[in-house]
Amino acid sequence: MYEGLKGFTDFYPAELAPRRAVIDGIEATARSYGFRETATPALEPAEMWTDKSGEDIVDELYDFEDRGGRHVTLTPELTPTVARMVVAEQQALSKPIKWFSTRPFWRYEQVQQGRFRELHQTNADIFGSGEPDADAEVLAFAADALVNLGLDGSAFEFRVSHRDILGELLRSFDADVDVPAAIRAVDKRARTEEAEYLDLLREAGLSDGQAREFDEVLLAGDEDLDELTAFADSPALADAVENLQAVLAAAADFGVREHCDVSLTTARGLDYYTGVVFECFDASGEVSRSVFGGGRYDHLIEEFGGQPTPAVGVGIGVMNSTLPLLLQVHDAWPGEGVETDYYVLQVGDTRSTAARIARELRERGHVVETDVSDRSFGSQLSYADSIDAETVVVAGERDLENGEVTVKDMASGDETTAPVEAFPGDFERPTCDDFA
């Protein structure tokens, strides 16, 4: 007997149905914003990640050498892949480019609450606009997706930060600071003990006093962004603060400012992020981890060999992620189970009539099953009950000899007959009551 691998999950139909409803809901919201669907490969050159984040990231990849001697990896996230795609067709694509996709990703990491080694994620990205409106639209799409799934607006919050603010604050110290390493330390702040966090900042080049001062400035900036420009006389820092304020102002016009809290200790761990970044959290605190995140990555297209192209996006985990936990905590999780509208029960040599009825009901958009196992009347009726069929249509030899079928409501047990040639007739969703 074989067992599945740790961090990988089987989903049976009743378990997958609500997840499919979540995916469909998020994708419908993406389409309503004008995002167009793409499909991307599962396997990519590992250098697409190691070149941008360092060789240490290999520990988090499902990487190997293929038969051609290439260092490849199962894709851990989408952004480098869509950046590669934009570069390949950049001249032919109308700007802004707005893409979305839902697909699996693989990360070799510690399995814990809401975090698995295989996850499914819906990504939405905008390429070709550096305006605050683009950042605000990504925030609005993410908020609308959650609300459309049934969450109250008070159930979640976006913690919004700015990578350039962090970078300029770090450069303001009289120290040789490894800025990317220090920002990665900030990204780990909420998940590590204070001593370990400060050690990481010291390893990045700050003294103990500077590390503590830097952290204090971040916390003060959450309450008053003017505290940041007062701390360091830097035009670049002032520009970054102004950009964050502009994004928040645009978010207000887009109707999502109420979901946004400034949180400068939110950093996002990947080095390609620039500008505004954000993470979504459960406002009640019951889901302790980030639900999902996103942000701006203005230099990645150019680093991949394309023309300078600003970009911003978000990745929402839809399976093997914390989003299902958020929806469950706030009673917005779709009901489990697979709905069946009709079961067409066959008794005797009635396949052609049963198939015709099933086909016409499906043409009306209903979920319809019929017997494919040559089972008895009782077995078929028990099966129809087990799949929660709403209505059973009995096409039996005796019924057909009388020119009729039996229509049974499974919830009430009521049943009646209907002329076989008039079923389903002109009814969009024929029921027992229509023929009683």
Image (cartoon, grey):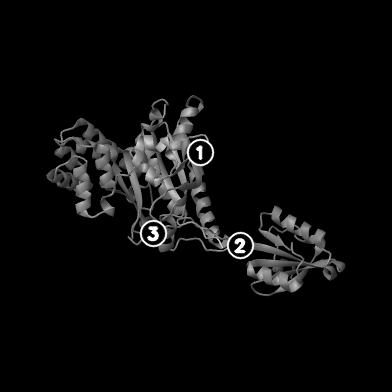
Residue 315 image-quadrant placement: top left
Residue with the mark numbered 2: 339
Q: Left or right: 228 with respect to 140? A: left
Most foreground residue, 53 or 378: 53
Amino acid at dot 2: Glu
Q: Secondary structure at mark 2?
A: loop
Residue with the mark numbered 1: 66
Most foreground residue, 79 or 417: 79
Q: How many marks?
A: 3
Residue with the mark numbered 3: 113
Q: Is residue 272 visible?
A: no
Residue 171: % across, % down: 20, 35
Q: Residues within 10 Å of mark 3 (few under 14, many from 20)?
A: few
Q: Nearer the viewer, mark 3 or mark 2?
A: 3
Q: Secondary structure at mark 1?
A: loop
Looking at the image, tell me whether mark 3 or mark 2 is earlier in sequence order. Answer: 3
Q: Residues within 10 Å of mark 2 (few under 14, many from 20)?
A: some
413 over 176 or under it: above or below: below
Q: Residues within 10 Å of mark 1 (few under 14, many from 20)?
A: few
Amino acid at dot 1: Asp
Real-space CA distance between mark 2 and mark 1, rounded to the nearest whole angstrom = 43 Å
Real-space CA distance between mark 1 and mark 3, rounded to the nearest whole angstrom = 32 Å
Residue 164: % across, % down: 27, 36
Looking at the image, tell me whether mark 2 or mark 1 is earlier in sequence order. Answer: 1
Amino acid at dot 3: Gln
